[in-house]
Image: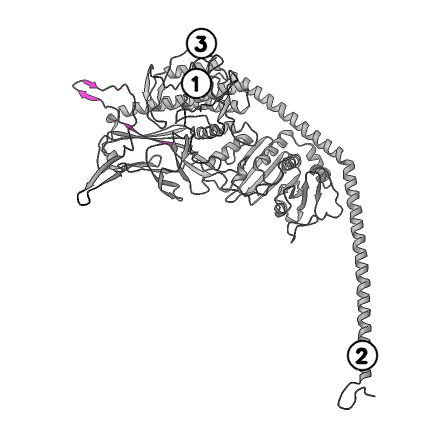
């Protein structure tokens, strides 16, 4: 019988019945949902309780073995450190013996009497033929490199001061010899003039220098400039120089003796006073600087702190008795034996070549010239922490052309100047003109700049890779720093690797590159190649480089070969390779100042260093790689990918596991690199360990354990130095 009445309407009783059924159904569903929620909550609480119990069990287990793990790690590190220290000591002693037995006629720079004798004999040597002089300069440069190495060995203060002063004296003497040979060539400019141009131009290339000389004999007012095709260096002159009796010298030194002066000047500016080394009293420090063309090379002394850092400032002293140095190369005294007025980059500094000393007085040290620099309102110029000079220094000078020989019958006559080679004054003094206007009866003062800038074109050295367009800086002799203020109209042709620019005056110039142009790193990977062999690949912001470590030797590999051919595929010690890479423009190394210039993921440095130590211990067996989660785990933790890798090929993507490292605990995480979000959930079946070393041992095969135990301490130490110098966990 139908429940509907006529017209299709539902009765009131039927509505009540249907409503009751719906209420009962809803209550039943709510009850079932409540029971299910309670069951899920109970299960969740049970899981949390079990996880908490498991966490407590793992923490208890980790706590019980913590001391054993830390002691074992400490023992391994101390054992390796002791072996490395002994090996370094033995190597230094062997190097000293080998140097003593060298017997090639060169002095030992560590023996003051020998090096003093060498300097004095070279001062007295009247040889001025360019080829022979450059050969002697090469020997002196080699001696300065040995002195840099001695300074890098962290000698005592007295020895460091002696090495420093000897190094400065050698560098100053090299510059003086360059000037003497330049003067000799220019004296005979007329005899070697070019028939086509009427001027004299020559290029002399040595192992460490390239000398370009041009003498203006023709004085053609239409002369614009000259290009030395042999070395792809050119210059442009304004008209007033084109008609002057001048000579232009462009001396390219493949080394840089000026940048260390800037670093030392900055250090002195930051350290206004120092304690006297003789009397012990506090005194205001007088900055000790060398003649502008020379100075102590900073790279060698930077290695005094492992991993690279600021140079130790070594104050120049005259000796324990305060007596004058016997082999001083520079002097500002008026009473002199033979002087040559250079007027070069330091202004008018007179170079004195003093006579030799008796052999028994070789214990005194050479003393560099002491110039007082007003430190008030000091402009520190280019920041050499942020920028690196590359490719050496181009010393640009304009000299007064020495008097040329005149032929009179059978006689050759030449005017002899006692002043030596003189710098031509350029730019000339500004001329102030005072004018009056008859219509306005008003006096106006105006200053006319009568010295247009000079132009220079340089082809980038083959031994340098510029990752960005190079910047040009000139040397400020007063402030003792590089500056870009006087450089204008810079034009760079990347295809030809050629840069052109204008500068206000003739002065030393260098090419700069951002030290951290290739940072922060976009990724990195350290993987074993064999026992005691591994490869660190760093994907930088601009190029990718790989460093292969084998024993205590390193080798650079890169697809970019321009500017790097001289170091690619060459085995070197780590310190030598680091220096070579920085000098070549490929810097992947950092120091304590780097975080000011690079965006980083700040980490606890002590924890980071401890991780590098343990990575080095395991680098024959495990591969390590960058992880995106490292930037999300905070300053007190590190995240990286790890896997055992005993083969020679690349690591497969699915083989990687993610590890979370802290100062107190290491653990393997459940997440993968491809996971959607970061989580600290522990990997199933994994445990906590107090050290990264023991954490990874949990997943090491017997073959891997055997390879790790047999890793040589020199290999471990080299990998550790590499990681600590690059710090990929922070700078990527």
Q: Is 110 positioned to the left or the right of 527 in the image?
A: left
Q: Which residues are magenta?
A: 394-419
Please say whether residue 565 is visible from this viewpoint: no
Q: Where is residue 104 shown, x and y percent of the image?
A: 47, 17
Label 1 environment density (alpha carbons within 10 Å; few <14, some 14–19, many ≥20): many
* Relative height, residue 634 to residue 506 (above, below): below
Cα–Cα span, label 1 and label 3: 18 Å
Label 3 environment density (alpha carbons within 10 Å; few <14, some 14–19, many ≥20): few
**Mark 1 = which residue?**
367
In-front residue for pair 181/101: 181
Q: Where is residue 347 shown, x and y percent of the image?
A: 34, 26
| Mark 1 vs mark 3: in front | 1
**Mark 2 = which residue?**
18
Q: Where is residue 532 shown, x and y percent of the image?
A: 63, 33
The secondary structure type at the circle numbered 1 is loop
| Mark 1 vs mark 2: in front | 2
Q: Is 54 positioned to the left or the right of 250 in the image?
A: right
| Mark 3 vs mark 2: in front | 2
Q: Residue furthest bottom?
A: 6
**Mark 3 = which residue?**
359
């Amino acid at each position: 019988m139908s429940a509907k009445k006529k017209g299709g309407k539902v009765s009131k009783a039927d509505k009540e019945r249907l409503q009751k059924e719906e209420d009962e159904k809803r209550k039943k569903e709510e009850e079932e949902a409540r029971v299910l929620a309670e069951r899920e909550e109970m299960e969740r609480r049970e899981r949390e309780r079990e996880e908490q119990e498991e966490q407590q069990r793992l923490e208890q287990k980790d706590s019980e073995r913590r001391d054993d793990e830390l002691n074992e790690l400490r023992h391994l590190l101390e054992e390796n450190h002791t072996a490395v220290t002994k090996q370094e000591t033995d190597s230094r002693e062997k190097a000293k013996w080998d140097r003593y037995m060298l017997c090639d006629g060169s002095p030992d720079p560590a023996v003051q009497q020998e090096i003093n004798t060498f300097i004095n004999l070279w001062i007295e040597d009247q040889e001025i033929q360019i080829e022979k002089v450059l050969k002697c300069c090469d020997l002196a440069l080699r001696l300065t490199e040995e002195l840099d190495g001695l300074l890098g060995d962290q000698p005592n203060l007295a020895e460091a001061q002696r090495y420093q002063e000897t190094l400065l004296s050698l560098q100053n003497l090299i510059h003086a010899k360059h000037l003497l040979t330049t003067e000799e060539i220019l004296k005979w400019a007329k005899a070697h003039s070019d028939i086509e141009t009427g001027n004299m131009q020559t290029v002399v290339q040595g192992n460490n220098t390239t000398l370009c000389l041009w003498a203006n004999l023709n004085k053609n007012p239409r002369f614009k400039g000259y290009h030395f095709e042999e070395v792809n260096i050119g210059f442009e002159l304004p008209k007033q120089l084109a008609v002057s009796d001048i000579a232009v010298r462009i001396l390219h030194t493949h080394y840089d003796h000026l940048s260390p002066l800037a670093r030392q000047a900055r250090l002195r500016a930051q350290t206004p006073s120092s304690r006297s080394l003789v009397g012990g009293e506090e005194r205001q420090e007088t900055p000790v600087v060398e003649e502008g063309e020379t100075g102590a090379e900073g790279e060698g002394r930077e290695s005094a702190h492992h991993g690279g850092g600021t140079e130790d400032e070594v104050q120049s002293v005259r000796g324990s008795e305060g007596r004058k140095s016997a082999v001083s190369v520079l002097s500002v005294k008026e009473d002199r034996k033979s002087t040559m007025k250079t007027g070069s980059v330091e202004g008018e500094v007179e170079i004195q070549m003093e006579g030799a000393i008796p052999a028994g007085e070789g214990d005194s040290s050479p003393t560099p010239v002491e110039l007082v620099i007003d430190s008030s309102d000091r402009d520190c110029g280019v920041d050499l922490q942020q920028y690196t000079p590359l490719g050496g220094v181009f010393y640009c000078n304009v000299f007064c052309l020495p008097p040329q020989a005149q032929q009179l019958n059978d006689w050759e006559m030449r005017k002899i100047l006692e002043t030596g080679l003189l710098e031509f004054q350029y730019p000339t003094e500004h001329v102030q003109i005072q004018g009056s206007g008859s219509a306005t009866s008003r006096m106006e003062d105006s200053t006319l700049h009568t010295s247009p800038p000079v132009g220079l074109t340089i082809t980038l050295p083959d031994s340098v890779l510029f990752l960005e367009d190079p910047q040009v800086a000139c040397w400020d002799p007063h402030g003792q720093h590089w500056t870009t203020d006087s450089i204008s109209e810079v034009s760079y042709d990347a295809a030809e690797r050629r840069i052109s620019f204008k500068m206000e005056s003739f002065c030393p110039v260098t090419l700069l590159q951002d030290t951290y142009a290739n940072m922060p790193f976009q990724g990195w990977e350290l993987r074993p190649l064999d026992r005691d062999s591994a490869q660190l690949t760093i994907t930088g912001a601009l190029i990718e480089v790989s460093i292969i470590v084998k024993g205590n030797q390193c080798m650079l590999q890169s697809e970019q070969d321009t500017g790097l051919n001289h170091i690619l595929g060459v085995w070197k010690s780590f310190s030598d390779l680091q220096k070579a890479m920085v000098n070549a423009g490929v810097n992947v190394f950092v120091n304590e100042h780097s975080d000011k210039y690079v965006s980083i993921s700040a980490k606890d440095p002590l924890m980071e260093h401890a991780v590098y130590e343990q990575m080095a211990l395991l680098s024959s067996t495990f591969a390590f790689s960058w992880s995106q989660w490292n930037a999300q785990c905070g300053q007190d933790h590190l995240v990286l990918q790890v896997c055992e890798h005993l083969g020679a090929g690349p690591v497969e993507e699915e083989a990687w596991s993610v590890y979370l490292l802290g100062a107190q605990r290491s653990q393997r995480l459940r997440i993968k690199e491809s996971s959607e979000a970061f989580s600290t959930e522990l990997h199933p079946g994994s445990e906590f360990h107090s050290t990264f070393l023991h954490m990874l041992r949990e997943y090491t095969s017997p073959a891997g354990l055997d390879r790790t135990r047999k890793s040589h301490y020199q290999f471990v130490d080299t990998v550790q130095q590499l990681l600590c110098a690059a710090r990929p966990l922070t700078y990527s």
